[in-house]
Image (cartoon, coloured by chain):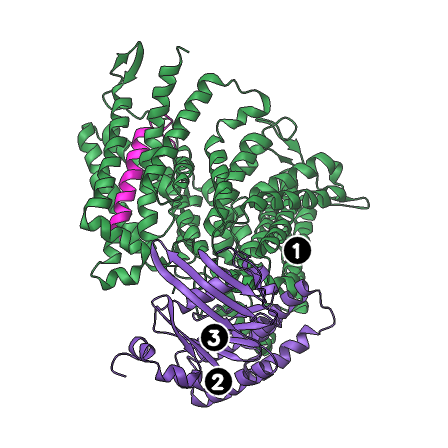
Amino acid sequence: MDQLLPFTIAGLVTGSIYAVTASGLVVTYTTSGIFNFAHGAIGMFAAFTYWELRVNRHLPAPVALFLVLFVIAPLMGALIERVLMRHLDRAQVVTSLVVTIGLTVMLIGLAQGVWKPEARAMPQFFGDGGFRVAGTFVSWHQTITVILAGGVAAILWYLLTKTRLGVAMRAVVDDRNLASLTGAQPHRISMLSWAIGSSLAALGGILIAPVLQLETIILTFLVINAYAAAMVGRLRSLPLTFVGAFALGLTEAYMIGYVDLKGFWQGLRPSLPTLLLFVILLAMPEERLRANLGRAAGGKAPRVPSLRESLIGVGVLVAAAGLVSFVLGAGDIQRVSQGLAIGVIMLSLVVLTGYGGQVSLAQLTFAGFGAFAMAEWGGGGSIFGLVLAAAIAAPIGALVALPALRLQGLYLALATMAFAVMAREMIFVDKRFFGFNSSLPVGRLDLGPISFDGEVAYMLLLAVVFGLVGVFVLWIRRGPFGRVLSAMGDSPAACATLGLDLTRTKLAVFAISAAMAGLGGALLGGVKSVAGPTDFEVLQNLPILLLAVVGGITTVSGALIGGLSLAVLPVLQERVPDLAGIVFLLTGAAAVSLGRNPNGIAFFLAETFGRFVPWRRGSRGSAEAEAGPPATEEVRKVAVA
Amino acid sequence: MPSRKPSEPAAPPLLECREVKVSFGGIHALSDATLVADRGMVTGLIGPNGAGKTTLFNAITGLHPPDTGLVRLDGEDISQVRPHRRARMGIARTFQRLEVFGSLTVRENVLVAGEIWRRWSKNNEVDVAAQAEELIERVGLRHLARERVDSLPTGPARLVEMARALATNPRIMLMDEPGSGLNEAETDEFAGLLIDLAEEGLAILLVEHDVELVMRVCKRIFVLDFGRMIAEGTPKEIQRNKAVQAAYLGTAA
């Protein structure tokens, strides 16, 4: 038991950091109603800025700290609110989630561009100094961390309950319009809350960087721990958030100290915060269906091509792939193949998000299961493997969604991300799966007489498969199930009052979408002929969602554009190595711009060039139009009546 | 009061709300809402803005179940039944702030409702496509059938919601300010449609600000003010009621 004290101290310290970070999340959410996915990324960016000032520019710690916490971070927060979030007021969860995920990815790209990835030491406060308590060494950094957490708690409590401003902040949450009638200025208050939130994120980042590592991705994903803690207070209660943060910090510390994890359970520790997040999400009471939160009206949306048109599209795609094969070298052909395979995964999002209005941050994870199925049972490229890839991913998709189905929009998205983390840390690395630091060979389809082993053949195969899956997606959209999905995306509340069982419908669409992602994963594995856990990183789920949305989440062509972009963007980086993080930067920037134009590139192209295509113009009248921007109901508390 | 089946031999009213209470974070949106609505007639529910009419609709349809109090359908307590189950028992509604399926056409809006209905009712004899056409015709939207609903003005969009609700072949329909957005001629036609539907046996509970319309089509009217029912009666009785004049029509009346 002589270990108890040191681990308790370590737990309290990390708990304090989680508490600081999570309380920033709560402040922003309660006031602006936007769930800031980029919270961790802001903290990461601020930590790097602090390092720059402190280490590179040799500023004294207090000066650097003051500059970051009270100047740079708040300005960043205010700027983000002013430029990006303001017109997202009351926007749908999907859009605000995509924009803040875009911001996350953009900040990662920016940070990697400015601070080239390399090992950096983040200094602790007062160096290595400290004191001893009952024989246990406690550093000044740890002491300060705990004190700061206490200070943050006290200041926030005072601010929110004792000041006019705090009362106004809480009023804005309850009813923005009402609050503005009484003289509060929602925009300024919201801006202020973003400034405070960013400052807290910055403090969290600066405190944890010496403990963890000054690295973009690690620090960005600190946000998951913050979510877990904040979710204990349902994103609203600061005291409960602190409870959650300390519970998480202590559990982590004690697990290091007392639990010897072996085999499969080794992945438990890194996925502990997500596991906690998942459990809390499951324990949350069912949300009420909210009426009156439908999509932004008047949005134009692309029309749905007829079967004939979509078959023509497949022909054009395959022909284009054929032509391209004469021009490109083997490496580039592989890129195109990769883009097409990712395109299939993105098609799964067209059905799920574009039509059904559900968000998933685990499509690449479903793809991972598909790739595994192909590797395990599709030896030598048997078509049986492809079928199994879809067949196995479907129930997994349903299973992930099942407990989370009572949840809507945001929470559902978080639950899928939690699953993605657990699958990556605990399942994919298991030796019965890909194995830690290892990979499995994945075959390319071989139909006996026809083998698709060659690069060109495989690319053509992928073009055909993408086309057929696209036809399938459009077939869904034109039929009864597609109508139900679009209806659910537009207004879940109205669907329920028509007698639709939303839970079953969501289950079905998750299963279908996961099956498509699984198929895409099996094909993607075939591109490089191997697949391992690192091919299905949690982070990579974000560009998949973002580029699918950027391409156009409601259209098949959008998935094509998105998939090809995701495959081709890295080429840019290879050719110009100085542009570290450029992929993230561009992806993020594009996604962020969607706040203003939610329909994506495919729609823009169709609008611009569509009028020059005669057979389209003729059929415009019969346009049974396609789903526009997906709508899910807002999670915020909104006064009805 | 524990729920018990009414022992009277007479058939219970189709819809009955008894002392329904709903609060949002300490504010009572509804403190005592009691009303009945029966088959074959239009029942009015009026009251000033913020009186709790939409909240009562949400309590009846289950979107926001009552904290306490009873909602009975055909004598059965449904106050804790989930929304889609209530819909399957025959409750349909329209929304004050539109909840149309904006990305679908008028036809698809009505069709999808019919398709949803067909699945849970397991009724395979009705041709839902034909039924959708009939309903579109009936609410007078034939000429707009191919339009996307998010491109429609409010008036027709409300009619889409009505046709959509009717596509589930309900026993009672709750209509939340269906008249706003309609011009005079359309309102006339709409009043006729309501009366026809009621004569066919449908129960209609109508929330409406257009007092003239309410007085014209309703057999009984309930008046809600600050979350409680302050009056009920025939249109004539309501017009004469002092409390109603004070609360609803303003003290000047």
User: Pointer 2: what residue?
Assistant: B217
Tag 2–tag 3 contact (CB < 8 Å): no
Picture residue at 70% right of the left edge, 41% below the top: A444
Picture coordinates of residue B176, whole percent (x, y): 45, 73
Q: Secondary structure at mark 1?
A: helix
Q: Are marks 2 and 1 on the same chain?
A: no
Image quarter where the N terminus of chain A lies is top left
Horizontal relation, residue A70 to residue A591: left or right? left
Picture coordinates of residue A610, whole percent (x, y): 53, 71
- Of badges 2 and 1, the one in the foreground is 2
Which chain letter goes with mark 3? B
Within-10-Å neighbours for mark 1: few <14, some 14–19, many 20+ = many
Which chain letter goes with mark 2? B
Instruction: Check the rendered structure and report the hue given to chain B.
Output: purple
The amino acid type, in three-letter code, at marker 1 is Val
User: Pointer 3: what residue?
Assistant: B151
Q: Which stretch appears magenta?
A: A190-215
Instruction: Check the rendered structure and report the hue given to chain A.
Output: green
